[in-house]
Image (tube, rainbow, N blue to C red):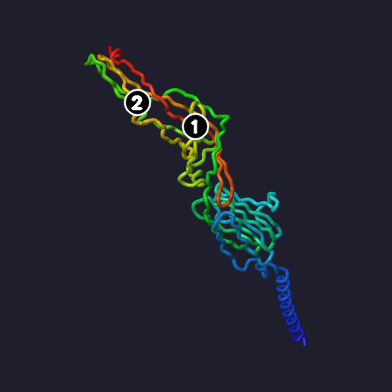
């Protein structure tokens, strides 16, 4: 009788333990139904955006997700979050938060927007690089994370719409002379005058430079924005001391460039050297200089975005010549 009672107690304990295990499993399943049942993104899409201004939307099957972060993003990109009104918002976004993730640098602009709890949109605002940008976006919650791969195609470069000069600050002056070359003519063995030929404009060039104040940008900064080769713009000439816009054009870059002067490179002049003289002839050109502030107005044909570049244009143009003679025969006496 005692043995049967002991066996009955053991069976009742085993049954109670099994029932408790089943009950606990059911309770856990009920408490975590959203985690294990609601798959917010059953199939992870692969997104490719072909042009600036294009938006791709991603529907979600459930609401238990937030925007977590971006992966494989270049370190030069600045990533931050805002709410739908533009107020600062920290990443990651939790399941309840609506907002926008901004990923930017000087040449790239991407916006990822959670506009409601069942949809996310990705908008490529700009990609000025010459190659696609590839990255991935992580969405999910504290239990599940899914990564959505993105390929963002390069778009059009900016085009120059116009260049404006501030004529009120135009300044010109003839700052002096620039040495071209020298030659020595020895006529000490003759009593007659001889003539030396000089060509003052043979190698003459007009030096032009655009300069922009502030941080010096790397060489590829402007080509990434404006394309290669860089565009040409109309620059002023001077007539009767006043600026005029004609057909003279220069490449917009921040390096000094040489342009034609408009002078005859084959022009020659004769310099007399008297008999019995050993003379040094120094050839010079006089320089016409001007400076004027400029603003370059540019726009992107894909996005319609606009950019401006402002600075100062400097021009140095030879416009006349003269020579100086030095009597070396007197120096050697």
Q: Nearer the viewer, residue 89 or 37?
A: 89
Give the image quarter of residue 19.
Answer: bottom right
Q: Is residue 322 positioned above or below 60 on the image?
A: above
Is 118 displayed left or right of 73 in the figure?
A: right
Q: Nearer the viewer, residue 1 or 104?
A: 104
- Under circle 1, the secondary element is strand
Q: Residue furthest left?
A: 189
Q: Nearer the viewer, residue 218 or 206?
A: 206
Is 269 displayed left or right of 302 in the figure?
A: left
Residue on which disc 1 sits: 314
Residue on which disc 2 sits: 181
Quadrant including the C terminus: top left
User: Which residue occupies 75% across, 83% down?
Assistant: 6
Q: Residue furthest bottom?
A: 1
Q: Earlier in the sequence, mark 2 or mark 1?
A: 2
Q: Is residue 62 positioned above or below 203 on the image?
A: below
Is 228 displayed left or right of 123 in the figure?
A: left
Quadrant including the N terminus: bottom right
Spot occupied by residue 171 in the image (x, y as percentages of width and height): 53, 27
Residue 219: assigned label: none
Spot occupied by residue 88 in the image (x, y as percentages of width and height): 68, 49
Spot occupied by residue 147 in the image (x, y as percentages of width and height): 59, 61
Give the image quarter of residue 117.
Answer: bottom right
Spot occupied by residue 193 in the image (x, y as percentages of width and height): 26, 16
């Amino acid at each position: 009788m005692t043995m049967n009672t002991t066996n009955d107690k053991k069976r009742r304990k085993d049954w109670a333990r099994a029932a408790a295990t089943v009950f606990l499993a059911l309770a856990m399943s009920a408490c975590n139904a959203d985690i294990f049942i609601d798959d917010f993104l059953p199939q992870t899409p692969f997104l490719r955006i072909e042009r600036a201004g294009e938006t791709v939307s991603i529907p979600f099957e459930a609401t238990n997700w937030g925007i977590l972060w971006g992966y494989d993003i270049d370190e030069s990109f600045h990533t931050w979050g805002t709410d739908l009104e533009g107020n600062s918002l920290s990443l990651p976004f939790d399941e309840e938060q609506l907002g926008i993730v901004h990923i930017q640098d000087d040449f790239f602009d991407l916006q990822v927007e959670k506009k409601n709890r069942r949809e996310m949109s990705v908008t490529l605002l700009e990609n000025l690089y010459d190659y696609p940008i590839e990255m991935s976006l992580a969405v999910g919650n504290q239990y599940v994370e899914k990564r959505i791969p993105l390929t963002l195609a390069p778009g059009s470069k900016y085009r120059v719409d116009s260049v404006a000069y501030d004529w009120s600050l135009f300044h010109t002056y003839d700052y002096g002379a620039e040495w071209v070359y020298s030659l020595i003519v020895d006529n000490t063995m003759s009593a007659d005058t001889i003539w030396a030929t000089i060509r003052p404009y043979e190698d003459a060039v007009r030096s032009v430079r655009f300069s922009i104040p502030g941080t010096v940008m790397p060489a590829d900064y402007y080509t990434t924005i404006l394309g290669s080769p860089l565009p040409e713009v109309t620059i002023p000439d001077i007539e009767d001391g006043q600026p005029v816009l004609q057909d003279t054009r220069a490449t917009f870059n921040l390096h000094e460039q040489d342009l034609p002067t408009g002078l005859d490179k084959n022009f020659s002049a004769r310099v007399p050297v008297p008999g019995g003289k050993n003379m040094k002839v120094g050839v010079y050109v006089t320089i016409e200089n001007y400076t004027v502030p400029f603003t370059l107005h540019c726009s992107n044909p894909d996005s319609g975005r606009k950019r401006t570049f402002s600075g100062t244009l400097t021009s140095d143009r030879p416009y006349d010549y003269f020579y100086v003679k030095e009597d070396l025969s007197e120096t050697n006496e």
